[in-house]
C-alpha cells in the first residue's frame, strides 16, 4: 500500500501543466432528478436522472514556480482540471471554473486560502 494522498498528489493542471498544488479539498456532487407522474397513481412511476454538478472547495493552493514565472493568477484561471492521485486510482475533475476565491498573501508568495470550484466532468482512471 502506498498510503494516502499528499499535497503533491492533489494539484491544478492547465494545458497539461501543473500550475498549483493543493493542501486539501472537499468535493460535493449533486444531481437534479425529476419524478414522472401518471394519471391516477398516488406515487411517481419513475424517476428521471438529471444533470450532475461537482463543487469543490480547495484549501491552501500554492502556485508552482513555473506558474509564478509565467504570471499565472488564480483569478484568471479558467477551464482547468483538479487532479487527485489516490493509491489505487486518479480522480480528475475537468472543465473547472472558480466561483469564489478568498486570499491571504505574503510578499513573494502567491497563496490562496480557499477557492471554490465548479467542475463540468469527473472521471476516474486506474493508477
Image (cartoon, rainbow, N blue to C red):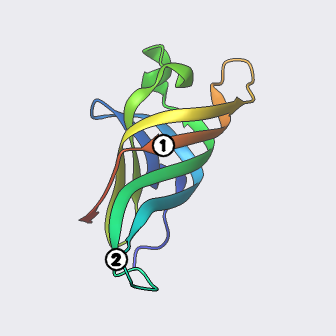
Nearest the viewer among 118 and 81 is: 118
Q: Looking at the rendering, which quadrant does residue 104 occupy?
A: top right
Residue at the image point whose x is 38% and y is 83% from the top: 40
Q: Position of residue 86 (x, y in %)?
A: 40, 66
Residue marked by disc 1: 118
Residue name at image x 47 percent, y 73 percent: 3
Q: Secondary structure at mark 1?
A: strand
Residue mark closest to the camera, 1 vs 2: 2
Mark 1 or mark 2, earlier in chain = 2
Residue closest to the eye, 22 or 77? 77
- Who is closer to the viewer here, 38 or 29? 38
Q: Is residue 126 left or right of residue 1?
A: left
Where residue 34 appears, as percent x and y from the top left, is 41, 65
Residue drawn at (40%, 85%) of the image: 41
Q: Is residue 117 above or below residue 28?
A: above
Q: Return the residue found at the far front.
A: 40
**Image check: 126 left or right of 45?**
left
Disc 2: which residue = 38
Amino acid at each position: 500500500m502506498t498510503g494516502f494522498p499528499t499535497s503533491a498528489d492533489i494539484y491544478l493542471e492547465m494545458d497539461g501543466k501543473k500550475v498549483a498544488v493543493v493542501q486539501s479539498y472537499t468535493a460535493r456532487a449533486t444531481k437534479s432528478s425529476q419524478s414522472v407522474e401518471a394519471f391516477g397513481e398516488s406515487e411517481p412511476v419513475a424517476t428521471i436522472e438529471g444533470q450532475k454538478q461537482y463543487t469543490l472547495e480547495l484549501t491552501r493552493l500554492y502556485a508552482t514556480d513555473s506558474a509564478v514565472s509565467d504570471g499565472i493568477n488564480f483569478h484568471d484561471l479558467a477551464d482547468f482540471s483538479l487532479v487527485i492521485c489516490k493509491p489505487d486510482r486518479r480522480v480528475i475533475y475537468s472543465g473547472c471554473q472558480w466561483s469564489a476565491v478568498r486570499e491571504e498573501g505574503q510578499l513573494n508568495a502567491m497563496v490562496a486560502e480557499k477557492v471554490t470550484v465548479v467542475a463540468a466532468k469527473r472521471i476516474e482512471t486506474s493508477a
